Amino acid sequence: MELSANYQKEKWTASGSVFYSYITNFITAQIDPELPRKYMPMNEPRFARRFTNIDAAAQAGVEGHVEYRWNQRWSTNGQIAYTHAQNLDWDEPLAEIPPLEGNIGLRYQRNKWWADARLRLVATQDRISSNFGETETAGFETVDFRVGFNPLEKLSLGFSALNLFDVNYYEHLNRGYRNMPEQGLLYEQGRNFTVFVKYTFFSK
């Protein structure tokens, strides 16, 4: 079940939705102590996961977006998303659910030029599944900056500085590679710079 709403008036634009789902025969996984690792058996994780079906799970959440246009050149926007999920069979949080996340952006546009600065806020994910073997993931904040130019109607040129303050972080749903250090934590890129050229060959 999902309920959505939209609002637009003069300088304001907003949209949001709330949802709830009751899921049966849901596929998840749990650590099986009868499946030890073949190589370096004393290293973590010492046991593999076995996929299994559970009878019932429930998810509820909210998503929202709002934008305010200060004038023809400046605008501010924000987004938020959160999902609360529960494994009803095992009476614990459902595994692999992203944490509360929000974005706050500031955009400037003048003629063919535009610039965008964005703050991303991700909360700590401490609703974890012990049966799945999840570990708590720390929250983090990152800042990205992008600037672009449209010399032609279908051509865009741009530059971006991502993770501007070089934050050391990893996402809750990241998948590590086998035998990597720090128990499979796959960190995101530090400060990095990119350029892009985009041309639209077909448009409606």
Image (spheres, grey):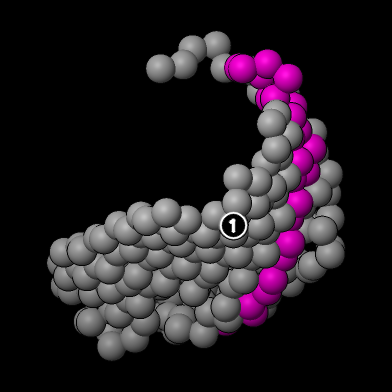
In the picture, the quarter occupied by the C terminus is: top left
Residue 191 x %, y %:
84, 55
Q: In this view, does 89 lie to the left or right of 174?
A: left
Residue extending furthest toward the top = 201
Task: State which quadrant residue 188 falls in.
Answer: bottom right
- Does the magenta run of residues contain 147? yes
Residue 106 x %, y %:
66, 57
Viewer can see residue 96? no
Label 1 element class: loop
Crowdedness of circle 1 by 10 Å Cα count: few (<14), some, many (20+)?
A: few
Could you tell me which residue is drawn at 65 percent across and 52 percent down?
74
Q: Nearer the viewer, residue 78 or 88?
A: 78
Type of amino acid under label 1: Trp
Instruction: Name the main secondary structure of what is drawn in magenta.
Output: strand
Q: In this view, does 177 lie to the left or right of 65?
A: right
Could you tell me which residue is drawn at 69 percent across and 71 percent down?
141
In the picture, the quarter occupied by the N terminus is: bottom left
Q: In this view, does 79 lie to the left or right of 117?
A: left
Residue span colored magenta: 136-160
Q: Which of 28 and 148 is in front in this view?
A: 148
Q: Which of 26 and 203 is in front in this view?
A: 203
The answer to whether 113 is drawn above or below residue 72 in the figure is: above
Q: Is residue 193 left or right of residue 99?
A: right
Residue 103 x %, y %:
58, 64
The answer to whether 19 is drawn above or below residue 149 in the figure is: below
Name the residue carrying label 1: 70
Could you tell me which residue is drawn at 69 percent across and 31 percent down?
111
Q: Nearer the viewer, residue 4 or 13?
A: 13
Could you tell me which residue is drawn at 73 percent across and 45 percent down?
115
